Image (cartoon, rainbow, N blue to C red):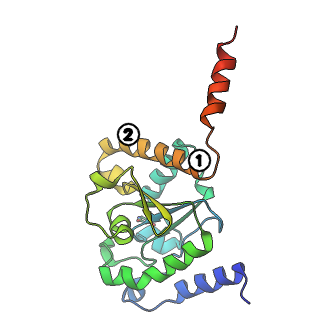
Amino acid sequence: MCSNEDAWNILRQEILECQQCPLSETRTQAVPGEGPQKANLVILGEAPGRNEDLQGRPFVGAAGKLLTELLAGAGINRSTVFITNTVKCRPPENRPPAPREREICSPFLQRQLLLIKPKIVCLAGRVPAETILDTSASMSAMHGREYEREGQTYYVIYHPAAGLYTRRLIPTMEKDMLKLKSLLDEKTGQATPIREKQRRLNDFSRP
Ligand code: URA
């Protein structure tokens, strides 16, 4: 029988050696993802960019720096999150991954999610939101909202790169991240129950 650790190693190796789509011909290396194997939160981006392709790690460029800051601002340490992408190899010139490339790559993500069993999968941007939720709704309609699909909770945020191009989106992105943290606390049983909050308020107002 195959242990969880074996399953992780086999999956990682399959991703690194994959040649099922043409992205494998132009990549430097595949980027499987990184983070704890039992993370409560998974962040799903679009595809590796130039820095990720060179380093073999997700979200290590400017968008990644902003993502790390947004997470920290909401009280989420990046090291507690599993971060990966809809496709594991960089599309040439950073074009969006084609529907067929996403389809071919999707079993890798499905297997990662089966192993991790996260409470929430956060979809960062239009490509992961469209791919997973099978919708063409606009990002302005989807961001900051929770979705359920086959027993899995998803939550949509703007892609961090959107904040780099459009700085006025950043306050909205910060608010969405705070909402994600509350949702995560709720799902992991870390939210302070209303009764406890009331007791603390009562204690505070006593002379
Ligand atoms: N953008 C993404 O969508 N993913 C990365 O890993 C880096 C940039």
Q: Residue at x 36, y 89 (%)?
A: 22
Residue nearer the viewer, 82 or 94 = 82
Q: What residue is pinned by disc 1?
A: 185
Please identify the quarter of the rendering in which residue 20 is found. Answer: bottom left
The reply to whether residue 77 is visible in this rendering is: yes
| Image vertical order of residue 184 relative to residue 24, above or below | above
Image coordinates for residue 11, horizontal then vertical, percent = 59, 83
User: Residue 71 vs residue 198: left or right?
Assistant: left
Camera-near label (1 vs 2) is: 1
Image coordinates for residue 95, horizontal then vertical, percent = 29, 73
Residue nearer the viewer, 49 or 3 = 3
Q: Residue at x 52, y 71 (%)?
A: 55
Please identify the quarter of the rendering in which residue 41 is found. Answer: bottom right
Q: Residue at x 52, y 48 (%)?
A: 183
Tell me the distance, in whole angstroms, between the alpha carbons under discs 1 and 2: 21 Å
Image coordinates for residue 164, horizontal then vertical, percent = 35, 51
The reply to whether residue 30 is visible in this rendering is: no
How packed is label 2: few (under 14 Cα within 10 Å), some, or many (20 or more)? few
How packed is label 1: few (under 14 Cα within 10 Å), some, or many (20 or more)? some
Number of numbered labels in the structure image: 2
Q: Residue at x 59, y 47 (%)?
A: 185
| Image vertical order of residue 136 relative to residue 164, above or below | below
| Image vertical order of residue 137 relative to residue 198, above or below | below
Q: What residue is pinned by disc 2?
A: 171
> What's under tag 2, amino acid-wise?
Pro
Please identify the quarter of the rendering in which residue 157 is found. Answer: bottom left
Residue nearer the viewer, 6 or 134 = 134
Image coordinates for residue 120, horizontal then vertical, percent = 52, 59
Q: Earlier in the sequence, mark 1 or mark 2?
A: 2
Confirm if mark 1 falls within 8 A of ligand 1: no
- Secondary-structure class at tag 1: helix
> What's under tag 1, amino acid-wise?
Asp
